[in-house]
Amino acid sequence: MGVTRTEVKEAAVPLKAKKKTGFLRDIVKNKVLYVMMLPLLVVLFFNNYLPMAGVLIAFKNYQYHGNNFFENFFLSDWVGFRNFEFFTATPDAFTITRNTLGYNFIFIFLGLVVSVFFAILLNEIKNKFLSKFYQASMLLPYFMSWIVVSYIVFALFGEEKGFVNKSLLPALGMQEVSWYADPMKWPFILTFVNIWKLTGYNTVIYIAAIAGIDQEFYEAAIVDGASKWQQIRSITIPLLKTLMIILTLLAVGKVFYSDFGLFFQVPRNTGALYDTTQTIDTYVYNALRNLNDVGMASASGLYQSVCGFVLVMISNLIVRKIDPEQALF
Amino acid sequence: MQKAKRLIGLALVTCMAISMIAGCGKTEEASPSTATNSAVDTSASTGTETLDPVELQWYVVGNGQPNDMDKVLAEVNKYLQPKINATLKLNIFTWGDDFENKMSAKIQSGEKFDITFTSNWACNYQQNAPKGAFVDLTPLMDKYAPKTKELLGEKVIKGASINGKLYAIPTNKEMAHNWGFLINKDMADKYGIDLSTIKKFEDLEPALKIIKEKEGANGVEAFQTLTGESAYRVLDFEKLVDDNVPGAIYGDGRDTKVVNDFATAEAMSLFQTLNKWYKAGYIRKDADTITDYAPARKAGKVFATTASLKPGKDAEQSISDGVNWTQIDITPPRATTREMTGSMQAISKTSPNPERALMFLELMNNDAFLCNLVNYGIEGTHYTKVNDTTIEQTQAGKDNYNNSLQWLFANQFNTYLFTTEDPQKWTKFKEYNASSVASPILGFTFNTENVKTQIAALTAVKKQFMPGLETGKVDPATVVPKFTAKLEAAGLKAAIDEMQKQVDEFVAANK
Amino acid sequence: MKHKDDVQITTVNKLNDIKPFWNGAFNLIFIIYALCCIVPLVLIIGISFTDEKTITVHGYNFIPKVFSLEAYKWVVKTGEAIFRAYGISIFVTIVGTLVSLAIIAMFSYVISRKDFKHRNKFAFIVFFTMIFNGGLVPWYMVYVNILHMNNTIFALIVPSLANAWYVMIMRTFYQTNVPDSLIESAKIDGAGEFRIFIQIVLPLAKAGLATVGLFQCLQYWNDWYLPLMFVDDANLFNLQYLLYKTLAAIQYLSQAANLPQGSQALANLPSETARMAMCTLAIGPIIIAYPFFQKYFVKGLTVGAVKG
């Protein structure tokens, strides 16, 4: 959209602003490149940018007094930041923010370490059939819906018929544990479940990235007598660095969001566990599901986005200071 | 950065502008039939000459679109056209998220349609109507739906109205509720338990003890109480917002004082009883993490549970669970806003033909042929008549047109009964309705607008503490004070005060 | 001589592998991990074939105590509709994956080019959509009131075409796998931009394309949300939505004990087993499709091969 605006202006006032001419000239010069970008830009325009004006609903008390969306929108009152108040109205505001950020940073860090580690290891396994088999099986948990996962976790830790309580702990001569009553057990369970479910997916990306590395690098290293460890340290990891940084930066933008299924379905929305399982998304769901309020729902999304955006812009700035090539933009 | 900001700003403005042009253009284009509105007048409501043909889009909740919907609609339209020159398009969406998501997207985006199912539990009437989603039918009833108005009667219409305005037509069905127990009769008989001695909640205890001793080893839950569907309902508080928000008046109608029901003496005593039962092993250990009530019941592993009752509830439940249930009424039948708004049809604000839609609903409520056609399909194809009021479904009916939505489509008392049902069912329903006592605030709907923030925060707090209490898992002596303190921190007082204010205004206005 | 060296190096490369001890240790780690991933799936398949009542009484078992096909019968009971739904799913998955792969591949290539002056601006335009969205209602409205795509097959394809996350991943693949010098030299040889892209760049980015293709394929295959939002017409329901609908209904009804009518609608629905059956059915085709993508993830791609 920015493009067309500039273009129009340019046609009207030629040769005035040098900088703008530069942009137009760039389009002419690189027209093939621009054509290649066009389809995705069109999709983004309709799918993402057009609806974006809707964030304004977060500042309205959205009602249906008109005959269509626009009339509804204009007839609804502006309410300033009133739709955001329910975040701070809860006595748990600190807990849910701490949980959301805490889990996300653990997941980002562990997720990165585990999947890079697995990807490198899988590449070194001699038997290619086994390597492929491991890869494929690691991806399986990704296909299980969170509800199914919650049944499995319940089958393990349930108090009536759970495997751990009924078979494992007695076998070890230990007391039964009330898993669903003790919040301190859940940071470990949730972290494990999250890593288990998503590692396969992230590992695929890194495996593909390793597969794309030019073999000549390794050949040269072997000729120089580099050991396996040296090859990994000085070729594989540096070449994966860009990808690691990009994926981490993208994840930082989402730290105010949490996986609803993980935090809602897996602990079964058990009230006794809220201290360590309630996140912004589950709070919003619990709080708003009876209100059905578009404005408040929109406000929660906007709040999460803005915070994430600020964080990612800062991180990106830091990355760019260190190495401009690695930055997101 | 500065440039990026400008770019975003520009993009937003452009988006807004373009979407406005596009949007407005489309809406005008999409409503060519609006013109017919003025053509409808009283004299025309019976003849077709002055009525332009229209199509009515109707959305309801159910088991999804049956295979033979098109065939049945063809019959419906043959019948409808000569009467009101309208054709019907009926879409049955699926229970739960499917219907909720579809309807909220349609309503919030202002999409055009005519009629939707609405209630206090799906496509929420109390939220959508005050926000302006539905047409106010009050001025139209006399003109287009006089028979329905008479059929429903003043009590029901009042109960279904919001601030004196009727936004939807309730289905004519059982219009009261009472609470009590469902007891596994076979088990009770086996151990010679005398059910006639059970008059109040605590009376169940000796029976539970016997069951625990004899059947506990077989994995039978003596008493089933689960999160959300718990024994707490037996206290029969008349909640002002919904089950998740504290604030209710006593169900026996003693006064109209709003209290935090979770902290009342009655609630405390119930929580204590449940806690005692939990410790005694009558309630399953993981009750607070279970939400599916059905599997254990169907497996015959539940002895007793609390339920919302009506005449013949035990028979109905027995058929669906395959277990021989018997019901014990604990609370007397009462008519509250909850039942009046349990199943209704509203006309959308975006409907191009609200009058015709209402004329159609009038027909549905009063024309037994049409009502049964929509409910059971075509006679001879989907069902066969046993006698005038009783039918049997054919295999084709079971496979291709099996809606089970008699409680939804207009007048339930006009529908046929299956051979498996009590032939006296409708008579009993009518007696039940007549015997019910109306709530002193029947027809009151709480407007959440001023305390939205508090309601949201309170709901989340309830979810944290209530499951442990209502399943007896935690000791109420320590948890209830914590619960109350946290509710207060979340704005309990403001919410209760607002409720009291609105209730007082309502009572004053209805004197 | 040189050629011989090459062969030697490749063999050395093969032999240069880790010591047998480490190989064994790594294998052990992966065997344990793979078991963690496979065992739950076996359990799920086991449950899906078990009689629902048996589960309530005896809990979960790997081998059904009482064998039952009830869950599958319920899930697929929609009859002929299921074949049509399979057709829709396959069509949408193939077309959607190909089209989205094409537009993502083109776009991210352009923003990966270091000589393209405005690459960061366009990267930002894409990235921005990842963080901000206008919410459900305006998004729904664009498709229904402006594009009029509701109740068409496009509504199942278009919304998932562009994905900022994959654009960023793909861009990184180009940056690390395609040397600038290669593009430069091709330009000097007089090749057009589009030819460079197709003949030189794409073959080098195969692994990246396979990754994004795999993920998009999964996205399209597993999607039930778009039909839920945009399709009322039963002829356009895809497989996942059909399954989802059935399950959501079972779930809803088995929890809503006190609806005015709950008991009537709830005949004899299997709830847990049906969920497991659906999980099994959904994984099936993916297991078949996965090896197709996997062959691009194997080490051994060399730029030299393309150059030569």
Image (spheres, coloured by chain):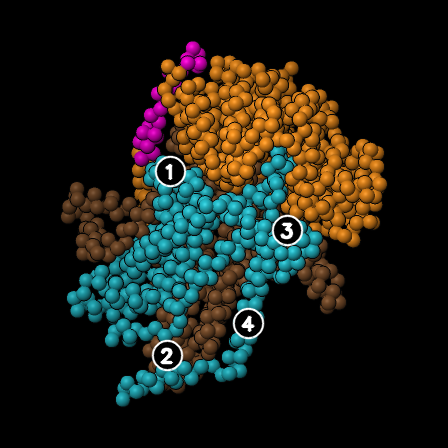
Chain colours: A brown, B orange, C cyan
Magenta span: B22-47
Q: Residue at x 40, y 48 (%)?
A: C88
Name the quadrant containing residue A150: bottom right
Tell me the distance, in whole angstroms, between the alpha carbons under discs 3 and 1.
Answer: 41 Å
Residue, disc 4: C31
Q: Residue A4 placed where, x, y %? A: 24, 45
Secondary structure under the numbered disc 2 in the rendered image: helix
Number of labels in the image equals 4
Tell me the distance, in whole angstroms, between the alpha carbons under discs 4 and 2.
Answer: 28 Å
Tell me the distance, in whole angstroms, between the alpha carbons under discs 1 and 2.
Answer: 54 Å
Amino acid at pointer 4? Ile
Residue, disc 1: C144
Secondary structure under the numbered disc 3 in the rendered image: helix
Labels 4, 1: one chain = yes
Q: Residue A319 placed where, x, y %? A: 40, 62
Q: What is the chain letter for disc 3? A: C
Q: Is residue A192 visible?
A: no
Q: What is the chain letter for disc 4? A: C
Apparent side of residue C102 relative to residue B121 in the rendered image (left or right): left
Residue, disc 2: A218
The answer to if A108 sits in the magenta stretch is no
Name the quadrant containing residue A180: bottom right
Tell me the distance, in whole angstroms, between the alpha carbons under discs 4 and 1.
Answer: 49 Å
The label number, if any, that marks residue C52 in the structure image: 3
